[in-house]
Image (cartoon, helix red, strand yellow):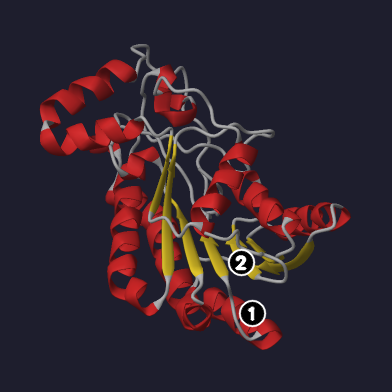
Amino acid sequence: MAKTDWRDKIVLVTGGSSGLGRVIAEEFGARGAVIVSVGLEATLLEQSTEEMKRQGVTVVPICADITNQADVARVFDEVRERFGHLDVLVNNAGRTHRGKIMETTPDEFQSLFDLNVLGTIRCSQAAVPLLLPRRGHIINIGSLAAKSASRWTGAYPVTKFAVAAFSQQLRLELGPEGLHVLLVCPGPVKRSNERLYKLKQTSDIPEAALLPGAGVQLSKIDPHKLAKRILVACEKRQPELVVPGKARILFALAQLWPALADWIVIRKTGGTRPASSSLPDQNHHPDNH
């Protein structure tokens, strides 16, 4: 398969001003794509836009809250008016969570679901009319938690399982019409800076569960290497990208032998001491995972 020429392609990245979203935006931009970076924090969006422009990336910043339907409509109206089409949507904006499942309130489930799941749905539904004529791509940033839940991760796995199901439904219904949908399921990703928003914790849980990946014993993933792999998977029109790939063994076991898979997850997630204190609360904000 010939390598995709990303020059002058229009790529919209939600949560594109920080973390993995920004790295993905930079990788597409380095290949000549025009980046539409959508972020909630105006100051950070302006700063990241200027930095990417200094790298030679063409960036159009749009400040918006993807939990707000009117904001989402405004974003895609602007894309339609400015460019007339869209080639790639990267649904990256999201938030993680920690807490015991029985101490995570329905309101906390709803808040996380609104961002991680409904935000992805809102943007995808708005983008599809612009993507289909171009045989475009939707890249949904999931997690290993989209395939296998873990202890003390509150509402997070529920939302990521939903993103995985939504991705499959899009593939089944719109794949025959030319839409490519890629679900990316990475383990813990290295960060160059602190999280834009503090990790939300709803109850006392083992300290190890507050670590990236909720204490799963996996090496952190280089976001730049992950972004390159995402572009390759996009070029090949793969349905999924799981990093590390060996996690697929656990996912298969979870279907064939759930008790064994549960035992492995428990063995691979350590920590018995309760966290010394709860972390600050937060309102809903796009962040990466």
Q: Which residue is mark 2?
A: 12
Q: Position of residue 131 (x, y in %)?
A: 51, 77
Q: Amino acid at mark 1?
A: Val
Tell me if 82 is positioned left or right of 285 in this view. right
User: Between residues 24 and 110, which one lies in front from this camera angle?
Assistant: 24
Residue drawn 52% across and 66% down?
66
Q: SS of the residue at dot 2?
A: strand
Residue 90 appears in the picture as rendered: yes
The residue sitting at 48% across, 59% down in the picture is 139
Q: How many marks?
A: 2
Residue found farthest to the top: 273
Query: Under tag 1, what secondary structure?
Result: helix
Q: Residues within 10 Å of mark 2 (few under 14, many from 20)?
A: many
Q: Residue 274 or 193: which is nearer the viewer?
A: 193
Q: Position of residue 263 (x, y in %)?
A: 19, 20
Q: Which mark is residue 200?
A: none
Q: Residue at x 49, y 29 (%)?
A: 212
> Residue 202 location, x and y as percent?
38, 35
Q: In the image, what residue type sits under mark 2? A: Leu
Q: Are marks 1 and 2 in contact (CB under 8 Å)?
A: yes
Q: Which comes before the other along the chain, label 1 or label 2?
A: 2
C-alpha separation, residue under disc 1 versus residue under disc 2: 9 Å
Residue at (68, 69) in percent of width and height: 62
Residue to which mark 1 is pinned: 79
Q: Is residue 177 above or below residue 271?
A: below
**Quadrant of residue 85 in the image?**
bottom right
On screen, residue 206 above or below 65: above
